[in-house]
Image (tube, grey):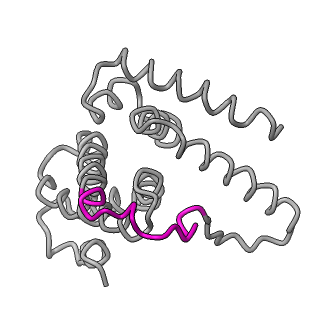
Amino acid sequence: MTIAAETLAAPSSALADGAGTLDEFLSGVAARAFRFAEMGLRHREDARDAVQDAMTKMLAYRDKPAAEWTPLFWSVLRSRIVDAQRRSVLRLRWLAPHTGAEDTVEWADTGADPSRRQEGQEAWSRIVTGLRRLPRRQREAFSLRIFEDLDVATTARVMGCSEGAVKTHLSRAREALQKHLEDFR
């Protein structure tokens, strides 16, 4: 069991007062955080590590008001992703042979309609490919604003930039994704 899973499974008495609320917050954000980290790192295990580190770090902030957890968590996760990207450069991962494994998407949906599932998988694969081609800041702005539905001010706080910069990054990301997806329609 990972540290994050142990933390989420820990009884409320093991943590300070209000830990149940932190547990709920971390449980609710876990899947989205993993997808965000995986898009940024392009490696499942590194993404899991980054999310686990961010969740562990949040334990130090459990006494903060719940309203501050969202921007704080995404800021911590973003920092962990940047750290992992730097480490991967140092490990010279780019010298390793390309297996194409990071380009595959595992689908958990076993719905009854295979044609709709196939269309959804193809559309999601194209979106992920388009997002991976975006510069890091544009990808972050798009993911936080669109997928996580954070407001401009919170996104700016998480990214450590101005609200105007968030709007610019988001606009450029949307334009690039629209061009990438035009032939798919």
Residue at 23% in and 59% down: 90
Above or below, comparing residue 168 to residue 42 in the picture = above
Q: Which residues are magenta?
A: 87-103
Q: Quadrant of residue 27?
A: bottom left
Assign the C terminus to one quadrant of the image.
top right
Residue 84 drawn at (x, y percent): 28, 57
Residue 94 location (% of width, % of height): 39, 60
| Image quarter of the N terminus | bottom left
User: Where is residue 117 shown, x and y percent of the image?
Assistant: 79, 63
Choose top left, top right, bottom left or bottom right for residue 38.
Answer: bottom left
What residue is at 86 percent from the left and 68 percent from the top?
114
User: Which residue is more in the foreground, 86 or 16?
Assistant: 86
Question: Is residue 121 shown left or right of residue 132?
Answer: right
Query: Would residue 69 be counted in the magenta stretch?
Result: no
Query: Which residue is found at the position 59% from the left and 27% from the top?
Result: 174
The residue drawn where x is 21% and y is 63% is 19
Classify 28 as above or below 184.
Answer: below
* Front residue of 122 and 20: 122
